[in-house]
Image: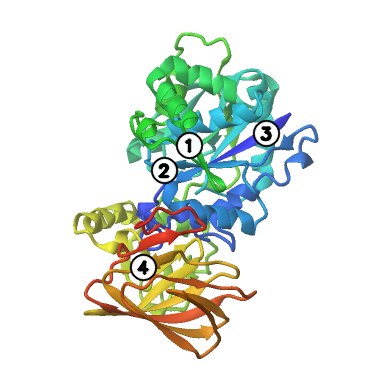
Amino acid sequence: MKLHPVILSGGSGSRLWPLSREHFPKQLLPLVGNQTMLQATARRLDGLQKWNRDLTLAPPIVVCNVEHRFLIAEQMRQVNRAPAQIILEPVGRNTAPALTIAALAAAAIDPEAILLVMPADHVIANEDEFLKAVVVGCELALDGMMVTFGVVPRNPETGYGYIRKGESQGKSGAFKIDSFFEKPSSKKAEEYLASGQYFWNSGMFLLSASAWLAAIEQFKPAITIACRNAFEKGKKDLDFIRLDTDAFAACESDSIDYAVMEPLAAGAKSIKEVSGAAVVPLDAGWSDIGAWSSLLDAREKDSRGNALSGDVYVNDCDNSLISSQHRLVTGVGLRDMIVVETSDAVMVAHKDRSQDVKKIVDWLKKNKRSESQTHQRVYRPWGSYESVVDGPRFQVKRIVVNPNAALSLQMHHHRAEHWIVVTGTARVTRGEEVFLLSENQSTYIPLGVTHRLENPGMVPLEMIEVQSGSYLGEDDIVRFEDQYGRTPGKKS
């Protein structure tokens, strides 16, 4: 049997601001360990055949926000996990449409595809236990069951939904799903934990593509129609599949649980391809890292319960997470605190209020502050740039161009640019001229002149760019050629 991983990577992780931002969300960050959460998810199934030699893995299908496409492709390349497809959502429509699109793509490759649906932003400490649960789920999915994984609760958590188990599914250790419950009050969560009948809802699923498509068509036919239109009208763009924007934007927003799993568990009308809904218990150190308090729980801590990262010094502190990205951060006498420093923001909160960090992001968006969307270092398919100094009518940037990468052939209406090479070699197109610059050499790009910057070498090109002019916004770009298929005038 071939298992098709489906990685859902459409979230923004606003509760983990200021590290997680709209254009660089938490799944693209190495929050626990050296790999990003996306990379850890992509590699999570590597040991599957240790538990069942008859299971083989297909390349993953990734469904993601169009803004993150190049970052996701590069991170997958870094861990040697080339996706079967990277499907780009023009707008977010929650998990049910995302899975429907993935199921259509998988069924086109393998009509008997079994899908393992994994959000890209989860942490699983004990991967062997997870893989054993996947093997159990595969057997149930072959029998037409739609399977979710229920995390054995460690405490009366109020930040997760719950699943109440029904009758046992024989020797498999799984159970039929009795019902789903929303995030409870503290009192309810304590009752759930004491009863031993409830699991945390992990948001991971295992089912056949045909079963999902049959179920979503019965319960949410409008979603099925919109997704089929978006997929069939979609276009290949480099390594990506672009869904039709209008068709997908017209799709209803709904979750996998609400759209299918809950009515199925409640005994909705039978579906030929589906034999029921089951939950497989999972006790593997799972967390969705939904807030800073969850990250504090997941990270390694010192003898006083502190999780420290970066250039940090603490004295007489307990049970706190303190993270420094760019400078020395110190704490004295802190208890149960979250302190996170980045190059352009500092966030301080009590760990019991970490869910409310989203309110900061809401305020930033309302006031049109860029800190909700981007870091000072902005990643592009060719490399990255970051603002060093920003003043009236001038700006200084540090630019890094990856080996064999190139910026678009472009022109600016409102600014001129001075380029100074720090390391590496630059190939410069300026009007009709094409020439090389090496370390400590520079050039000037007048306003209105067509130009391109390339790195023909084998090492990263690092340079300083000084912009001057009446308007320095990133949307002052007229593109003439671009090897990454980006639209003229767009920042992506």
Q: CA distance from mark 2 to mark 4?
A: 54 Å
What element does badge 4 sit on?
Answer: strand
Could you say which quadrant of the image residue 80 lies in? Answer: bottom right
**What is the crowding at mark 1: few (fewer than 14 residues within 10 Å), some, or many (at least 20)?**
many
Residue that mark 4 sits on: 411
Of the 4 image quadrants, the one containing the C terminus is bottom left
Q: How many numbered discs? A: 4
Say if mark 2 contacts mark 4, CB within 8 Å: no
Residue that mark 1 sits on: 200
What element does badge 1 sit on?
Answer: strand
Q: Is residue 148 left or right of residue 338?
A: right
Callout 2, which amino acid? Glu
Q: Camera-side residue: 362 or 430? A: 430
Q: Which callout, 2 or 1, points to the residue nearer the camera?
A: 1
Query: Which labelled disc corresponds to residue 3?
Result: 3
Query: Which labelled disc corresponds to residue 157?
Result: 2
**What is the crowding at mark 4: few (fewer than 14 residues within 10 Å), some, or many (at least 20)?**
many
First of labels 1, 4 by sequence position: 1
Q: Camera-side residue: 466 or 134? A: 466
Q: Position of residue 409 (x, y in %)?
A: 44, 65
**Residue depicted at x 32% and y 78%:** 416
Residue 171 visible, this orientation: yes
Say if mark 1 contacts mark 3, CB within 8 Å: no
Q: Which callout, 1 or 3, points to the residue nearer the camera?
A: 3
Q: CA distance from mark 2 to mark 1?
A: 8 Å
First of labels 3, 4 by sequence position: 3
First of labels 2, 4 by sequence position: 2
Q: Is residue 124 above or below residue 188?
A: below
Say if mark 1 contacts mark 4, CB within 8 Å: no
Could you say which quadrant of the image residue 21 lies in? Answer: bottom left
Q: Is residue 30 above or below residue 163?
A: below
